[in-house]
Image (cartoon, grey):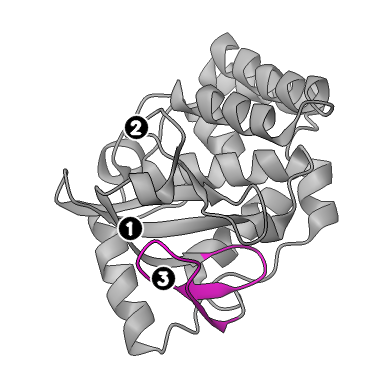
Amino acid sequence: MKGLIHLARALTLSCWLVAASALCQSAVASNLVEFSPGLLNRVEAKFGKGAVLRLNALKNLVESNQNLSEAEKVKEVNDFFNLIPYYTDIVHWKVKDYWATPFEKLTTYGGDCEDYAIAKYFTLRELGIPDDRMRIMYVKALNWGEAHMVLTYFPEPRSIPLVLDNLNPQILPANQRKDLVPVYSFNGDGLWLAKERGTGQRVGSSGKLGLWTDLQRRIAK
């Protein structure tokens, strides 16, 4: 999580005009849960049968829940990914800061805060939640004294967003999460400086953030 602190400072110095390239909807849709037999065989050889079961569970989650209400989809996805163990990037990836794809998170069976938020974001997109109703949000977690990342979901365009968090499994409106102080948020469309638990001020497109760009490349592959 310390890497997120450095990231926030870098964003401030560059007027926050850093974020990932706009994600191609078709690329995500065709790659997030489509796993060829050959790929699954390679996954099993490297990570074991449990990794294959987790990937198939994600595929089943996406394919079986298309007709649920948005509230039900949000809860299913939040609960699904919160079952995966938490590990820092240094412990899990042996690097200071790494943003994992949902595939990487499931096969390696671990990840840190941004990996939970990213996995929930892309999975909910697969379930038909519009991109403009979700934002990945960088926050300060006051109870932990460190940087943190969550996914926020807007039930209505101008409503108070709900917070999907791995620290607190209960999905609550942002104004009830006094332990989180928003800093900035982004999605595939843009980047916002956060107001106090509000929607924030848009400051650019999501076009230049290296970690997000690298994540997009790996998802497309």
Distance, label 1 to label 3, CA atoms, is: 9 Å
Near mark 1 (Cα within 10 A), the count class, few <14, some 14-19 or many ≥20, is many
Q: What is the secondary structure assignment of the residue under circle 1?
A: strand
Q: Measured along the vertical axis of the image, is residue 204 above or below residue 87?
A: below
Q: Position of residue 121 (x, y in %)?
A: 60, 46
**Quarter of the image holding residue 32?**
top right
Please state which of residues 96 and 153 is positioned toward the viewer in this rendering.
153
Magenta stretch: includes residue 36: no
Q: Which mark is residue 194?
A: 3
**Quarter of the image holding residue 90?**
top left
Q: What is the secondary structure assignment of the residue under circle 2?
A: loop
Q: Which residue is rendered at x = 84% and y = 43% of the image?
A: 30
Is residue 41 shown to the viewer in this render? no
Residue position for label 2: 168
Q: Which residue is rendered at x = 40% and y = 28% of the image?
A: 169
Residue position for label 1: 139
Q: Is residue 75 left or right of residue 31?
A: left
Q: Position of residue 59 (x, y in %)?
A: 74, 24
Which mark is first along the chain, 2 or 1?
A: 1
Q: Is residue 26 left or right of residue 56?
A: right
Distance, label 1 to label 2, CA atoms, is: 14 Å
Near mark 3 (Cα within 10 A), the count class, few <14, some 14-19 or many ≥20, is many
Residue range of the region highlighted in magenta in the rendering? 186-204
Magenta stretch: includes residue 192: yes
Mark 1 vs mark 3: in front: 3
